[in-house]
Image (cartoon, rainbow, N blue to C red):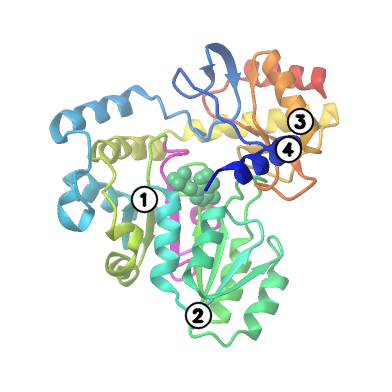
């Protein structure tokens, strides 16, 4: 059987400016990067606190690699659960104010494993329309009755919850929406879910580290306890600057995941050196409050500047600051024009975002300076 049909499908995608490609990064993460041999100022990484290349984290990684080797070696339930994994889980539980935490190799797996450990065919899952692909996939895979509610709309969620006859109900939402940057209305979502005896699971990939006084994310930002928000998922590859993910919650939740989460059981544990590096990163997240303050001040500066330029932004108080363009061709052309000016900002197009809502996804980091943000604004003024 030939690949001709696939090749013509790829051509259709190309013709519609929806073809996805990769670029080769030849440097650490932002702000200054080398891509395909050329230097750029980048505004597209998820390294929100500027920790991905922090010397203390790199040094902890090297030391643990010397002591424990490079790979996890086995799944966590066989012999892959090292001292550093165990210590990091305890530290993440304390950080989030939850009884226990469990490490996964990445956020995609944490979401697939958790939803599927909790739900089956007799159950129902309620998802925000703009949830991350890994949550949507997790819900579909579980076989539970799959219902989407309007974006961040508690009335729409309530309508659906009040009609369900399911054995178990799970409401799932991003804490900070990955493509729009807005924060879920969690106090209201948790209230209505608790009223209908449904669990709530929040994917705080983009909130953990950035929101809350100590960086413990949207739960801390809104002051939501484990009773109100029982299933908290966070990733380590963004603000923490390392890699991996965790789920935090009650002892029963974590024991259930250890017994049933297939993406936990049937995969090699994250490299122990990543866990060791993340332990240092976690300390910096908690103690270096100035990183969140710097980020907030840059976000405000960027938003003020865009407003003056008449650019269309979303209602986002977070480091995710999409500039709405609409047309995919135009978004691609603007991204290319910015690259010509030495700025690296990616265009996000359907199907990652809804049709007609292509955008330049600008992300800010505590490692950016005011001068760099002004340079971005200046370039945007020239290419808009
Ligand atoms: N959830 C959200 C909201 C995300 O944005 C991402 C990553 N883009 C993930 C989950 C997946 O996390 P990971 O990259 O660790 O697989």
The front one of 153 and 291 is 153
Disc 2 under 8 Å from ligand 1? The reply is no
Coordinates of residue 146 in the picture (x, y in percent)? 59, 72
**122 to the left or right of 100:** right
Say if 158 sits above or below 68 in the image: below
Q: Earlier in the sequence, mark 2 or mark 4?
A: 2
- Does the residue at mark 2 contact the one at mark 1 (Cβ under 8 Å)? no
Tell me the quarter of the picture where residue 171 sits: bottom right
Residue 8, disc: none
**246 to the left or right of 13:** left
- Does the residue at mark 3 contact the one at mark 1 (Cβ under 8 Å)? no
Give the residue pinned by disc 2: 123
Highlighted magenta segment, given as a residue range: 219-240
Residue 304, disc: 3
The front one of 1 and 216 is 1
- Does the residue at mark 4 contact the one at mark 3 (Cβ under 8 Å)? no
**Identity of the residue drawn at 66% across and 49% down:** 182
Q: Secondary structure at mark 1?
A: helix
**Identity of the residue drawn at 28% across and 64% down:** 258
Give the residue pinned by disc 4: 359
Disc 1 under 8 Å from ligand 1? The reply is no
The front one of 147 and 196 is 147
**Within the magenta stretch, is there residue 228?**
yes
């Amino acid at each position: 059987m030939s690949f001709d049909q696939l090749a013509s499908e790829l051509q259709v995608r190309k013709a519609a400016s929806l073809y996805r490609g990769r670029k080769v990064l030849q440097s650490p993460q932002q702000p200054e990067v080398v891509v395909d041999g050329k230097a750029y100022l980048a505004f597209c990484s998820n390294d929100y606190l500027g920790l991905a290349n922090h010397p203390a984290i790199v040094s902890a990684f090297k030391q643990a690699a010397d002591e424990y080797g490079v790979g996890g070696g086995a799944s966590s339930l066989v012999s892959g659960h090292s001292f550093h994994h165990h210590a990091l889980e305890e530290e993440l539980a304390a950080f989030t104010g939850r009884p226990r935490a469990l490490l996964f190799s990445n956020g995609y797996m944490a979401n697939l494993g958790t939803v599927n450990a909790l739900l089956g065919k007799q159950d129902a899952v309620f998802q925000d329309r703009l949830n991350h692909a890994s949550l949507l996939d997790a819900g579909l895979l579980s076989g539970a009755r799959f219902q989407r509610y309007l974006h961040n709309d508690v009335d729409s969620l309530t309508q659906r919850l009040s009609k369900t006859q399911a054995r178990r109900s799970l409401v799932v939402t991003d804490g900070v929406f990955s493509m729009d940057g807005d924060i879920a209305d969690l106090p209201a979502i948790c209230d209505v879910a608790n009223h209908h005896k449904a669990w709530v699971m929040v994917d705080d990939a983009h909130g953990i580290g950035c929101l809350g006084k100590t960086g413990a994310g949207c739960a801390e930002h809104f002051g939501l306890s484990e009773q109100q928000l029982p299933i908290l998922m966070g990733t380590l590859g963004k603000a923490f600057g390392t890699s991996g993910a965790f789920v935090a919650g009650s002892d029963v939740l974590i024991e259930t995941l250890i017994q049933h989460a297939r993406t936990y059981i049937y995969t090699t544990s994250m490299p122990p050196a990543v866990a060791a590096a993340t332990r240092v990163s976690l300390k910096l997240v908690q103690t270096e409050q100035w990183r969140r303050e710097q980020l907030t001040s840059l976000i405000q500066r960027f938003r003020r500047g865009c407003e003056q330029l008449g650019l269309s932004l979303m209602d986002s108080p977070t480091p995710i600051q999409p500039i709405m363009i609409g047309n995919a061709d135009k978004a691609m052309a603007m991204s290319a024009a910015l690259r010509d000016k030495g700025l690296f900002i990616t265009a996000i197009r359907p199907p990652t975002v809804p049709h007609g809502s292509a955008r330049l996804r600008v992300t800010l980091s505590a490692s950016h300076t005011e001068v760099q943000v002004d340079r971005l604004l200046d370039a945007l003024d020239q290419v808009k």
